[in-house]
Structures are given as C-alpha cells and as structure tokens.
Image: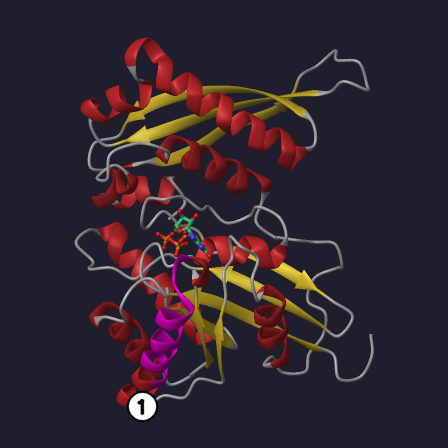
Amino acid sequence: MTDGYKSGFACFVGRPNAGKSTLTNVLVGQKIAISSSKPQTTRHAVRGIVTREDGQLVLIDTPGLHRPRTLLGQRLNDLVFETWSEVDVVGVCLPCDQRIGPGDKFIISEIAKLSNKPTLVALATKTDLVSKERQLSHLVDVGAVAEELGIEWAEVIPCSATAGTQIDEVRDALLNLLPEGPMYYPDGEITDEPEETLIAELIREAALEGVRDELPHSIAVVIDEILPRPDRPEDKPLTDIFASIVVERESQKGIIIGHRGARLKEIGATAREQINRLLGTRVHLSLHVKVLKEWQRDAKYLNRLGF
Ligand SMILES: Nc1nc2c(ncn2[C@@H]2O[C@H](COP(=O)(O)OP(=O)(O)OP(=O)(O)O)[C@@H](O)[C@H]2O)c(=O)[nH]1
C-alpha cells in the first residue's frame, strides 16, 4: 500500500427508481444490489467494493426513506439515517427525466441536518433518457437546489448507468473525495454480504418482476437451507437451496404462485440462473410460499426475517 491511499464509504440516495441500485452495480461491475422496475425494493445495506491501486470505495446501498406507517418502515428509516452519518460521501441521484421535487429536497435537507455531515455529490442520472437541452436545464436546477437548501455539491456529474456514460467519472470523483485510509477489504472482494443474503435478494428480485405495484412491500425471502448435494461427481457439484417467499395474505400467495404454479416456476427459473452465476456451481432451487399475516408490523417476524 502506498502513501496517499484513499478509502472510505459512500452511499446513494434519491427518490424511488432514481437509479441507485443500477449505478451501484455498474460501478462495482457485478450484479450485487437488487434492481427492479418497482420502487423501494432495496431493503438491505448491500455493499459493493471498488478496489484500485489508488484507493478503495465501499458502496452501501440503503433502502429509500419513506413515511413510516409500519414498524418495518420505521426500522428502514432508522437504518437510513444511521448509514448517512457513517459514510464519507453521499451521492444524491437526481434523475434527468424528472423535475427536482419536494421529495428530493426533503432527503437533501435531512442529510444537511446531520451533525456528522457527509460530503455531497449530485449525480444527474439517466442522461440517456433526455435531450442535451433538458440535461442542461436539469443541471441548472441541481445547482439552484444547493443554493436554496444552503448545501454545497462537491461535484455535479451527469451520468447514465444503463448506457455506461460517465461512469468512470463518477467512480473517480467518489474515490477522490475519500479521506486517506487503509484498504478495508482484500482485493477481489466485491461484497461482504453473506452469500445467503445475496441469494435471498436474487429470489426476491425475481419474485417482484411483473407483479402489481402494491406487492413489493409485502414480499420477503428467507433462506431455509443451503446444502451441497451428496454423492455428486467432483467436477459436477450441485447445491440444493431451500427458500421461502413470505407474503402477508392468501391472495398474494396466489399471485406469486400463479395459474397452476406457472409464476412460481418462472421465478424459480430466473432466480436459479442468477444464483448459478453467483455461486459458480449448478443449483437446485426449491421455493415455498408462506403467508405470515401482517409481518411488516410484527417485531417478532421482522427479527426472524432479519430486519
Ligand atoms: N434509461 C435508464 N434507465 C435507468 C438508468 N439507471 C437505472 N435505470 C432504470 O430505472 C429503474 C430503477 O432503477 P434502480 O437502480 O432499481 O433504482 P433505485 O433508485 O435503486 O430504486 P429503489 O430501489 O426503488 O430505490 C430500473 O428500471 C432501471 O433499469 C439509466 O441510466 N438510464
């Protein structure tokens, strides 16, 4: 390790669907955080790690801040505030295709109130969706918001995670703003989330694809068991994974299972492919759908589900 090595923690904030997870994934270069077209699907503080010769950036993916109507909502918000005061840099994602609104300003002003304030970077995401003119006027609005809220952007970077535009610039800027510090994680490590959590996230993501808008908050995934299949040839290992998809109501169970089990089969096939890739071995995935009534409001269940 050389002198001047920089290291630290960053997270992305922004309204639901702002592109935080997708950006985390492209910066890290491997699928880690859950990313789906449904808002507020990120539950766990999943870390992605960027290790370079000059520094190491640890990305923490926080859930979105929302009106705490349930115990789960409250716990998620507490987790968000805690994360914000622990990181060095917060990247505020302000998608170019959306006007900056009260929700964005609320998040920014909440961060500005923290006693242990992180450095703020504005990321004008999804540039691929807008014209150059719109992008420019968006950047003017981004500047104006800082003035209005009495904060300072250390950097303002337009970027597109899906088109791969200005991603190196985002990575450079974040790394540059970190304090000097040690390499926290060994080179090659992309995340310190236990495999089990990643597997659960992949199943949750597959289960959320194409379901109605009200479902995201009501789905959790619990990994019951991960077992290497005995008596397999050494060059063809197989892992058995038993997992439960937990929903709140019988009607939701029906949606997940689908007509004659068609949706559940699809979920299994999609998740299995992703898990194969993650583990590098073939897996056999056995999915179960369970109804735990009102789990979002119940402390006992929340603890059991790891929240
Ligand atoms: N066109 C375009 N779409 C993007 C870009 N980045 C993300 N998206 C899409 O926007 C949607 C939301 O992206 P996510 O990365 O899941 O957003 P998020 O901010 O993590 O969302 P939450 O987990 O709900 O807070 C997905 O459908 C992404 O494919 C981008 O740069 N360009």
Q: Which residue is at the far top?
A: 260
| Amino acid type, label 1 | Glu
- Locate residue 212: give its quadrant: top left
Name the residue furthest left. Answer: 69
Say which residue appears at 48% left-offset and 66% top-offset: 11
Residue identified by numbered label 1 = 147
Give residue 76's position: percent from left, percent from top.
Answer: 32, 57
Display coloring: secondary structure
Instruction: Give the magenta range.
Output: 129-143
Does residue 296 belong to the magenta stretch? Answer: no
Q: Residues within 10 Å of mark 1 (few under 14, many from 20)?
A: few
Q: Position of residue 58 (x, y in %)?
A: 59, 65
Taking the image as shown, residue 221 lies to the left or right of residue 65, namely: right
Q: Is residue 145 above or below residue 224?
A: below
Q: Is residue 281 left or right of residue 60?
A: right
Q: x and y percent of residue 168 in the render?
A: 63, 67
**Dividing the picture into quarters, in which one does residue 260 lie?**
top left
Magenta stretch, overall SS = helix
The N terminus appears in which quarter of the rendering?
bottom right
Q: Considering only vertical position in the picture, is 176 above or below 37? A: below
Residue 29: % across, % down: 63, 52
Front residue of 72/67: it is 67
Q: Secondary structure at mark 1?
A: helix
Viewer-proximal residue, 128 or 304?
128
